[in-house]
Amino acid sequence: MTITRGQFLSGSAKGSAALLVAGGVLGEFVDSAAAALPSNDTVYVRLLVGAELLASDFYSQAINASVTNSAVTKYLKLAYFNEQQHYQSVAGILSGEGVTPAVSNDITFTYPSGTFGSQDSIVALAKSLEDMTLGTYLGAMSQIQTTSLLTGLSQIAACEAQHASYFTSASGGRAFRLSFPPALSITQASNALAVYSS
């Protein structure tokens, strides 16, 4: 089943399997947020679920492309593992309030032609996606009202910043330079995700 961006954000998609929280910090306080999330928070968490599904899909395809050297492949695999854990945690927030989160089969992602044809193109898109994902988390944290979620979301954002730093360095850029990485509004984040969904 493929869902539209509007269905994804509104929660009107049906038929996805609910996931359980896979532990970690978010798992410790999902119960306190269950059935109590303001609707705006639910929209942001749905967006984070989408960002994690995109990241997981990208890393899975990048690993399977088998065009990267062993060092880059190692980090692609680690990033994929991290994104899977992040997905389970943010999806668990929705499951905890009785909302079915989107799963990988719900969204078809597309990438620019040639993305998986070389190490350089994979690393370049990984950097771009990580910058977008980090901005999405930062934007969500500035707007989410359920304060019990903020520590866990901050930890995920820190991990995404590490990913962005590595892939920036691997593409020949500076590992870090900004004192205040930009936060994306919900519209900016949604539009950025929409570029990769068909």
Image (cartoon, grey):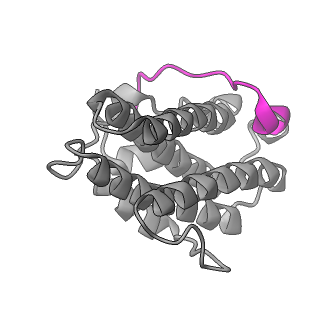
On the image, the x and y values in percent for residue 87 come to 57, 35
In the picture shown, does residue 39 fall above or below 89?
below
Of residues 132 and 114, the one nearer the viewer is 114
Residue at x 69% of width, y 33% of height: 97
Q: How many callouts does the rendering have?
A: 0
Q: Give the range drawn in magenta.
A: 10-29
Q: Is residue 81 left or right of residue 197?
A: right
Taking depth in this image into account, of 127 and 118 the one nearest to the observer is 118
**Visible in this render: residue 36?**
yes
Residue lying at the far left of the rendered structure: 113
Position of 172 relative to 30 (above/below):
below
The foreground one among 47 and 117 is: 117
Considering only vertical position in the picture, is 196 above or below 1?
below
Q: Main secondary structure of the magenta part?
A: loop
Check if residue 146 falls in the magenta segment: no
Residue 73: x percent and y percent?
Answer: 44, 36
Left or right, 35 with respect to 65, comes to: right
What residue sits 77% from the left and 38% below the top?
A: 26
Q: Position of residue 170 (x, y in %)?
A: 45, 57
Q: Quadrant of the N terminus?
A: top left
Given residues 46 and 109, the one toward you in this image is: 109
Give above or below for 130 relative to 175. above
Which residue occupies 69% across, 69% down?
142
Magenta stretch containing residue 27, yes or no?
yes
Indicate the quadrant where residue 2 lies: top left
| Residue drawn at (76%, 44%) of the image | 36
Q: Is residue 12 visible?
A: no
What is the quadrant of the C terminus in the image? top left
